[in-house]
Image (spheres, rainbow, N blue to C red):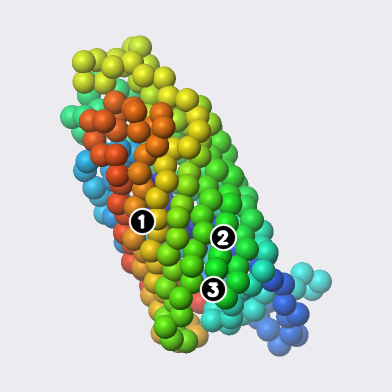
Amino acid sequence: MTRLLLASTTLTATLLAAPLAAQSSDPALSFTLRGGVASGPAYFGAEEYEVKPDLGFGFNSVNIGPLQFGDPDPRTEKLGFGLRGSFNYIGMRDASEYDALTGLDDIDAAVELGLGVGYTTRNFAAFADVRQGFGGHTGVVAEAGADAIFRPSDQLTLTAGPRVLFGNSEYTDTYFGVSSSEASVLNPAYDADGGLVSAGMEFGATYQINDVWGVETAVTWDRYMNDAADSPIVENGREDDWGARVGLTRTFQLGF
């Protein structure tokens, strides 16, 4: 599923997770969509916050010929190792809209596509994703995290755990660097090297109303690290970024 990360929206779909023996009576395809709203910084390091749409997607099961895995019931725990598809969208940075970006170039919207792996037990989950950027940046990022999982009831699940984001020099210099042609008293020239970009925490809650509908919420906190933290863009803005989202989920079951 998805959450708001800094100035971006991240969509993660679990492709394979603890394959189960699908039954002939199961739907051909079962998946869950989430729609809602999220709040986060207008750009990486911004003092201003924006409210944006929040979207999420996750596979529950596939039962098409020899391709059979998962369980159509969204309440079924998907335990063990799994392959993840990871998608991230970073909105355009328009320097003319923010005084702190005066003199800096605009950055087009970017899309990041990649894969990852995850491991889940009843009380613990961990993941690691790698994505390639297209559009506004063409760098490579890696994200990893882990969660403790608490289940106060059959319907309510709580999660909490650390998150880290790494980026290569092309990524960090795009969002945190200042070229010589952009340099000013406000934002002096700065070359941002790759490495650990941010570290933080995520706290989430999922309430499954019934077999079809649910509610998901999350709060994230991230602190910029290393060259990202030393960037004049961050020094003129915020070193800590907060995000929050809430959305309704609906499970769909399709037969072919």
Q: Residue furthest top?
A: 180
Q: Earlier in the sequence, mark 1 or mark 3?
A: 3
Q: Residue at point 25% right, 28% down?
A: 101
Instruction: Find the distance from the CA under tag 1 to the CA under tag 3.
Output: 20 Å
Query: Which picture quadrant has residue 27?
Result: bottom right
Identify residue for label 3: 123
In which quadrant of the rendered image does the C terminus lie?
Answer: bottom right
Q: Residue at point 34% right, 60% down?
A: 219
Asked if marks 3 and 2 touch (Cβ < 8 Å), the reply is no
| Residue kind at label 3, given as amino acid type | Asn
Q: Residue at point 45% right, 30% down?
A: 172
Q: Is residue 16 left or right of residue 229?
A: right
162, 25: nearer the viewer: 162
Asked if marks 1 and 3 touch (Cβ < 8 Å), the reply is no
Q: Nearer the viewer, mark 1 or mark 3?
A: 3
Locate residue 161, reporting x and y percent.
45, 60
Query: Would you say residue 230 is visible in this rendering?
Result: yes
Is residue 28 placed above or below 203 in the rendered structure?
A: below
Q: Residue furthest left?
A: 99
Q: For numbered disc 2, what is the local secondary structure?
A: strand
242, 121: nearer the viewer: 121
Q: Earlier in the sequence, mark 2 or mark 1?
A: 2
Q: For numbered disc 3, what is the local secondary structure?
A: loop
| Residue kind at label 2, given as amino acid type | Ala
Query: Would you say residue 138 is visible in this rendering?
Result: no
Q: Is residue 199 left or right of residue 72?
A: left
Q: For numbered disc 1, what is the local secondary structure?
A: strand
Q: Residue at point 47% right, 47% down?
A: 164
